[in-house]
Image (cartoon, rainbow, N blue to C red):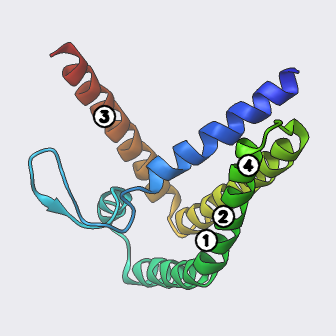
Amino acid sequence: MKIFNKTLVIAMALPLVLGSMSAFAGQDHQDHQGRMMKGHHGGKIFSQLDLTAAQQQEMKTLRQANRSEHKAQRVENHKAMLVERQQLDKLVLADNFDESAVRVIAEKMSQQQVERRVAMLEQRHKMLNILTPAQKQKFVELKQQRAEKHVMRLDTKNNH
């Protein structure tokens, strides 16, 4: 029963986490002071790393290749997701709950989320390996500063 609970929690939480992470990716949005911002927040960090022209070109090439792959897979992934949702709807609307059938679909969906997450992290790994050791260290420091600033912002909001 513990495995079922863990699988169920992962199946429900992973899409929410990944969905919330990608909600603003590639879109215009406003920061907390109302200014329009482009893209995702990670770009600001890379602009602070003093990349060489060669590094910038390599990053651009990686992003373009990833974008092309993503576009090619988007339609296929969307169709598969619709089929899975329809299957789940049928199972949920059925007179009797078929736990094993739901489990199969939920595990498949979870595995797909894991695969997408691994692919995303592989892409990030490739981009970070373009950096020199000094740039990597600065990247870590900037990420830490951002995390601390975010926590302070959350604390400030929660205390008001």
N-terminal of the two: label 3 or label 4?
Answer: 4
Q: Secondary structure at mark 3?
A: helix
Looking at the image, is mark 2 or mark 3 earlier in the sequence? 2
| Circle 3 Cα neighbour tier, 10 Å, few/some/many (<14 / 14–19 / ≥20) | few
The residue identified by callout 1 is 78
Amino acid bearing label 4: Ser
Q: Which of the labelled discs sits on residue 94, or is there none?
A: none
Label 4 or label 2, whichever lies nearer to me, is 2
Q: Position of residue 98 (x, y in %)?
A: 86, 39
Q: What is the x, y in percent for residue 95?
A: 79, 39
Q: CA distance from mark 2 to mark 3?
A: 33 Å
- Element under label 1? helix
The quadrant where residue 146 appears: top left
Nearest to N terminus: mark 1 or mark 3? 1
Tell me the amino acid under the disc marked 2.
Answer: Met
In this image, 85 relative to 68: left or right?
right
- Cα–Cα gap, marks 3 and 4: 29 Å
Q: Disc 4 versus disc 1: distance between alpha carbons?
A: 15 Å
Q: Quadrant of the C terminus?
A: top left
- Which mark is in front, 2 or 3? 2
For the N terminus, which image quadrant? top right
* Vertical relation: 113 (above or below) 13: below
For the point 69% across and 59% down, the residue is: 86
Q: Amino acid at mark 1?
A: His
Other-residue count near label 4 (Cα within 10 Å), few / some / many at <14 / 14–19 / ≥20: many
Q: Which residue is mark 2?
A: 81
> What residue do we see at 54% from left, 79% from top?
62
How far apart marks 2 and 1 lie (CA) works out to 5 Å
The residue lying toward the viewer, choosing from 96 and 131, is: 96
Residue assigned mark 3: 150
